[in-house]
Every structure is written in structure tokens, then in C-alpha cells.
Image (cartoon, rainbow, N blue to C red):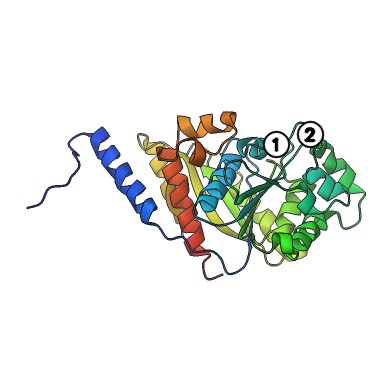
Amino acid sequence: MSQSPFDTSTPLASELADLTQRRAALARAVVPKPAHTRVITVANQKGGVGKTTTAVNIAGSLARFGSTVLVIDLDPQGNASTALGIDHHGDITSIYDVIVGVTPLAEAIQVSPENPKLLCAPSNLDLAGAEIELVSMAAREYRLQRALHAFLDSPAGAGVDYVFIDCPPSLGLLTINAFVAATEVLLPIQCEYYALEGVSQLVSNIELIRGHLNPDLRLSTIVLTMFDARTNLAHQVVSDVRSHFPSETLTALIPRSVRVSEAPSYGQTVIEYDQSSPGAVAYQEAAVEIANRGATT
């Protein structure tokens, strides 16, 4: 009878063996590109759920697997820009200029130093006032959609496989612009108490957008974040979410991870900062799932 090459006699050893096998599976993974550009809005009206972290790390994972990925940072805090190593504090052309002004999206896009296939349209503090400025503008809900479509139809945007739009944690005109510009919504849910609080409201808002502004929008993906395998609560949340959203919820679980939290302070995603860490492995697995789910769409 053959023995496992790994010592699994203790919980820690078992965990390390599992992580080693998962890393090996990722090293062998062949990740398909979508036939058409997938535009995915990452949204949750509840703050602190790992929304921006999920957006940049899945984007970084897909870029590592060979796809060209554009992250649009629509949050005035600019955390996605920071995590991708983009300086957004100076006098730069930002997504604000694209939405409020007449600047083409291509002029705002920068290449992340992490990966030449990872692009970012950065935010800056000017975006904080955009909600008020948009109120009086014509076609205020369609500003981002029109700019994005013009970019994707141009030679510069022809090779983009994925667009991830990182939203502020509120339902204002910036988030509505993100919903109108996308065809998919990715919803991060943390494995903590009150996890499903507000989710029904977000689903209702998606239905409203579908009915009035964007009939192609759908909730395609739910990512469970901040999972702590040691607690019964985390396992219960996973069970509850999967029972409510069986086809949308990914198999991959994103664990609580110090490395994931540290990475943005170095201007990196965790994929670049520590690719072999449990958090990085989980985000890469999530990216593979997302790619495989959309390979025929």
C-alpha cells in the first residue's frame, strides 16, 4: 500500500500538504481566455468585505495566467490604484477626467509595474466630487459605459480580455455608472456575522438596473472572503451563502491572511508580493474558476 509523500499526521502538516498540492495544480493550470471582453463590476454596499482586495487580486491572477486585464478604479479612496503600484496622488489623468470630462479612457490608463498585461485607470481625490457634478450632466448614468465601449472598440482596447470595475461601497451615481457599463457583477461576501445583510438589497438594485438601464447585467459570481476554518460561524456562512446562491458562489474560499493585508502597502497584489501564500493561492484558484465559467460566454 503506497503512502502519501506528505506527513499528514498533524493539522498543520495536513494543511501544508494540501497547500503544496494546490500550488502544484495551479502550476499545471491552463486558463482559457474569453471569446469576448468580460466587463465585471465588483460591488458590495457593505464596507470592509474585501471588495477592492478581491478585485485587484483576481485581476492580478488572470494577468499572471496570460490574460490582459484592465482595472478601473471608481472608488475615490484609490485603494485599487495603490495596490497596483499606480501613483494616483499627483497631477495625473484619472478616471475622473474620463467620466466628468471628455478625456478618452485610453489617456487615463497606466500599466502596472507588476505585470505588463495588468492595466489600471486610476482614481484620485477629484472623484469624490464627481457624484455631485454628474447630477446635472446629460446621460449621467452612461458616462463610463460610453467611454469604455469607445476604448474597447479602438485598436488600443482590442486585446483586453477582462475589465474589473472597483466601486465605492455605496449606491451613488459612480456605482450606477459601473453597473450600466458592465455585464456581470462580482459580489464579495465576508464569512462573518451579518454576512448576508444588504445582499438582498444589492440584488434588488441589480434588478432595477436591469429593468431600466442595462438589461444585460447579471450577478454572475460570489466570492467568499475572510474565511477562518477554525470557526463554526465561518462554515455556517459558507453553507448559507451556497444554499441561497448555489450557481453563483465559487468553490474557492479566500482565507484571512496577513500577506493579503500587507501587499497593498508595498504597491503590489498578493500575487506579486507572495505568490505561494495561502491567500494568493486561493485568489488564483478563484481566478481559474471565473475564467473557466466564462470561457464559452
Tell me if residue 103 comes above or below residue 30 in the rendering: above
Residue 109 appears left or right of 253:
right
- Which of the 4 quarters of the picture holds residue 276? top left
Q: CA distance from mark 1 to mark 2?
A: 8 Å
Residue 77 on image: x %, y %: 71, 34
Q: Which residue is mark 1?
A: 78
The residue located at (38%, 52%) in the rendering is 27
- Indicate the position of residue 14 as horizontal and vertical percent values: 24, 39
**Other-residue count near label 2 (Cα within 10 Å), few / some / many at <14 / 14–19 / ≥20:** some
Secondary structure category for the residue under label 1:
loop
Query: In which quadrant is the C terminus drawn?
Result: bottom right
Q: Would residue 237 be seen by someone viewing this image from the given angle? A: no
Answer whether labels 1 and 2 touch (C-beta < 8 Å): yes
| Closest to the observer, 295 or 66 | 66
Q: Earlier in the sequence, mark 1 or mark 2?
A: 1
- Please name the amino acid that badge 1 sits on: Gly
For image coordinates 47% across by 63% down, the residue present is: 292
Q: Is 166 placed left or right of 149 in the picture?
A: left
Q: Secondary structure at mark 2?
A: helix
Circle number at residue 150: none
At label 2, which amino acid type do we have? Leu
Residue that numbered label 2 is attached to? 125
Location of residue 20 by image quarter: top left
